[in-house]
Image (cartoon, helix red, strand yellow):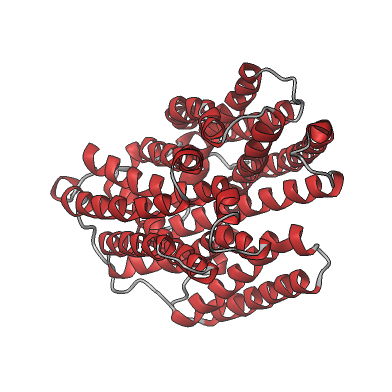
């Protein structure tokens, strides 16, 4: 009976969302500190700077699914507290770094902590929410994810202008401690399932495959997509995925049974999540460059200038969840992904003469699209797995998001680099930069529209369209 089980209180929901917001913020914050890190006493090479950004993303994406399974097996609250401890420890290691290798190691440790935090927060939320309220609770969680990216941009910009990069990493330590106290007090324990599979060998194969693939995506623009290193990474990823699939099909209790992808809805949901963040992070990649190079904004003003993206993400997710309950998922998903693409096409028209209020309206269109589709897509992936595998479903959901984000950065960065070879700091070359940015964003928008069609077709149903979150 639910009345004898722990329920999702408002304070628990706020604490869970705060945890995922902080974890997501550290993905974006470091991007605005790259100039300061490059000029620091660490003297990092360009390659080491890339790894200072990407170590977090690669470790985060690679460990999400195994970390979600660990939470299901040994307890989600314990996984969340362990993740916060790792996250704070990683921040301290980065803040104390006297060499680039230590900075990169600290970033990787933060990524491992985030991999425990993110699926644990969603799986606790799913376990504590009754089915009729689950869609709206996930809409709030999705809002926190979106706000995390924006908070990272704002925090990184303010730290870049008024503080130091070490101050940003030191801030993670008290934040992690405060959140751990809040989790201990506000979040109830959910039942652990001793029979839930962790499958160490399968986890190793899957983590290795994801590391290889994400590495290839991240390094493709730098090394070239046909370089030996990138092709070897994709080859290793394909081989490890094949080995994982063979192992999982034979294992009695696999980490992730590949047969779950027989569900057309799950495939559509995962593709939709990846496509949405593919578009969103392609914008994040060019936004800071456009505002600083073309508009002459300072780092702090650049971080604050993306705040219009919060409006749609704050207001629209619950509307999207209600719309899905009333009409089924295809309308909010199709309209949301279409609006993200439309927002990218509008941003692609921006140049040095575009007034900021007009640019802000373009961001608002993209923001509304994200808020409209993200809760339904997230709920789809979670709902297609049994309740006892909520952590695994959350890991799968977030892995799709991170891979989509990495692809968005890779594609927009590759197209931009192929069409612009100058110095964007040079005022005489700003026009060439914004032209190349426009082509890159239009390319991303076209890919996103194709993915949106595939997602909407995948949601074609046999009579369950109107059941919504139930």
Location of residue 413 with respect to 75 vertically, above or below: above
Left/right of residue 90 with respect to residue 146 in the rendered view: left
Within the image, what quadrant is residue 38 found in?
bottom right
Left/right of residue 455 with respect to residue 269 in the rendered view: right
Q: What residue is shown at x 56% (from left), y 37% (from top)? A: 299
Q: Is residue 168 visible?
A: yes
Q: What residue is shown at x 27% (from left), y 65% (from top)? A: 75
The front one of 305 and 81 is 305
Horizontal and vertical percent position of residue 21? 40, 44
Within the image, what quadrant is residue 87 found in?
bottom left
Location of residue 314 with respect to 354 vertically, above or below: below
Horizontal and vertical percent position of residue 365? 61, 25
Image quarter hosting the C terminus: top left
The front one of 142 and 271 is 142
Q: What residue is shown at x 45% (from left), y 37% (from top)? A: 147
Horizontal and vertical percent position of residue 318? 42, 29
Q: What residue is shown at x 67% (from left), y 49% (from top)? A: 409
Residue placed farthest to the left in the image? Answer: 4
The front one of 463 and 416 is 416
Q: How many marks?
A: 0
Residue placed farthest to the front in the image? Answer: 41
Q: Is residue 331 visible?
A: no
Horizontal and vertical percent position of residue 400? 57, 54
Left/right of residue 48 with respect to residue 154 in the rendered view: right
């Amino acid at each position: 009976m639910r009345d004898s089980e722990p329920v999702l209180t408002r304070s628990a929901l706020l604490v869970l969302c705060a945890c995922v917001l902080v974890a997501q913020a550290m993905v974006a914050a470091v991007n605005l500190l790259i100039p300061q890190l490059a000029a620091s006493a660490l003297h990092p090479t360009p390659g080491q700077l890339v790894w200072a950004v990407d170590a977090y993303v690669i470790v985060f994406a690679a460990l999400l699914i195994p970390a979600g399974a660990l939470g299901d097996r040994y307890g989600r609250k314990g996984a969340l507290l362990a993740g916060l401890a790792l996250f704070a420890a990683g921040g301290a290691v980065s803040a104390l770094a006297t060499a680039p290798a230590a900075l990169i190691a600290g970033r990787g440790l933060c990524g491992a902590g985030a991999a425990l935090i993110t699926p644990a927060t969603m799986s606790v939320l799913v376990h504590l929410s009754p089915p009729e309220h689950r869609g709206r609770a996930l809409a709030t969680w999705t809002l926190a994810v979106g706000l995390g990216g924006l908070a990272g941009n704002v925090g990184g910009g303010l730290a870049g202008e008024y503080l130091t990069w070490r101050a940003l990493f030191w801030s993670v330590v008290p934040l992690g401690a405060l959140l751990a106290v809040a989790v201990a007090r506000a979040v109830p324990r959910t039942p652990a399932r001793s029979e839930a599979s962790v499958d160490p060998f399968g986890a190793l194969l899957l983590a290795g495959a994801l590391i290889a693939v994400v590495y290839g995506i991240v390094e493709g623009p730098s090394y070239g997509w046909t370089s030996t290193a990138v092709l070897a990474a994709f080859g290793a990823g394909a081989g490890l995925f094949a080995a994982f699939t063979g192992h999982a099909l034979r294992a009695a209790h696999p980490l992730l049974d590949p047969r779950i992808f027989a569900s057309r809805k799950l495939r559509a949901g995962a593709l939709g999540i990846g496509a949405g963040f593919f578009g969103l992070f392609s914008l994040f990649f060019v936004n800071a460059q456009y505002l600083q190079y073309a508009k002459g904004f300072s780092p702090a003003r650049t971080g604050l200038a993306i705040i219009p993206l919060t409006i749609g993400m704050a207001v629209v997710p619950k509307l999207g969840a209600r719309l899905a309950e009333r009409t089924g998922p295809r309308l909010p998903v199709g309209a949301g992904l279409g609006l993200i693409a439309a927002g990218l096409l509008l941003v692609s028209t921006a140049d040095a003469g575009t007034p900021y209020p007009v640019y802000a309206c373009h961001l608002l269109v993209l923001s509304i699209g994200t808020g409209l589709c993200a809760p339904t897509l997230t709920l789809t992936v979670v709902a297609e797995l049994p309740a006892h595998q909520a952590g695994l479903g959350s890991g799968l959901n977030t892995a799709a998001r991170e891979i989509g984000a990495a692809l968005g950065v890779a594609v927009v960065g590759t197209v931009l680099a192929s069409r612009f070879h100058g110095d964007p700091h040079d005022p005489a070359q700003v026009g060439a930069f914004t032209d190349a940015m426009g082509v890159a964003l239009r390319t991303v928008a076209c890919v996103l529209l194709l993915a949106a069609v595939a997602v909407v077709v995948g949601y074609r149903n046999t009579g369950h369209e109107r059941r919504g979150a139930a």
